[in-house]
Image: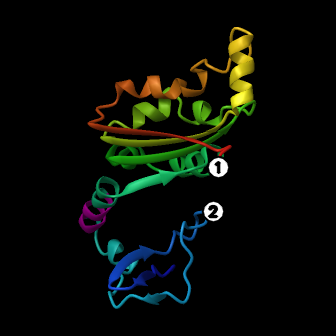
Amino acid sequence: MVEDFTWVNINGDEETVWRQPHHRCDVEPAYKIGANHRRSDHESMHLTALRVCRQIYNDANNILWSTNTFSFNDAATSLDRFMDAQTTRQKQSLRRLRLQMDWVWGEDKPWNHVLGMTLIRSLAGLRSLRLQINHSMYATLFQEAKARGNELGLFQTRRLDFVHKMAILPLTNVEVFVGDLSQP
């Protein structure tokens, strides 16, 4: 059994509680556990409690999917593998999703591949989507495309095809952030 660690960041008078990432996640946490952290005094629930009876498991499972925000920054591996491993009920119970996309011009478009209609339809319970798009489009590339009448296809929306598909979902909150990877 994997123990669920809770850490507290000691930052002056402010304390922030962070969780150790799931052992199967291949994504590094956005924080480092070091000298400014101490193990929390809160007892963590052992996952074996979910095996006591089917009712406890079903209730806890639904709470897990409906109250947490699931965050992904890699379509080809983490999102694809994670969603493949979940049941239809779990996907339908997912309420909040955060996708961080780093796009470099000329690369394949894995997000459109992973976020196909089959997966999007399975997210029937999704209510909140936070989309962060970090792109790399230098000003010189923009000027060249503009001068050539966009024959390079830089301004086409094909990279966001999945966003149009998500219109079928009952989303109540959508946040979109666009950043530039070429800036330090």
The residue tagged 1 is 77
Q: Which residue is at 28% across, 32% downward? A: 170
Amino acid at the residue labelled 2: Asp
Q: Provide the secondary structure element on which disc 1 rests.
A: helix
Q: Classify residue 104 as left or right of residue 17.
A: right
| Rendered location of residue 64, percent (x, y) | 33, 60
- Location of residue 113 with respect to 86 vertically, above or below: above
Q: Provide the secondary structure element on which disc 2 rests.
A: loop
Colour basis: rainbow
Magenta residues, as a range?
Answer: 55-61
Q: Which residue is at 29% across, 57% downward? A: 67
| Rendered location of residue 11, percent (x, y) | 41, 82
Q: Classify residue 115 as left or right of residue 127.
A: right
Q: Are marks 1 and 2 in contact (CB under 8 Å)?
A: yes
| Rendered location of residue 118, percent (x, y) | 49, 30
Q: Earlier in the sequence, mark 1 or mark 2?
A: 2
Magenta segment's dominant SS is helix
The residue tagged 2 is 26
Q: Classify residue 25 as left or right of residue 121.
A: right
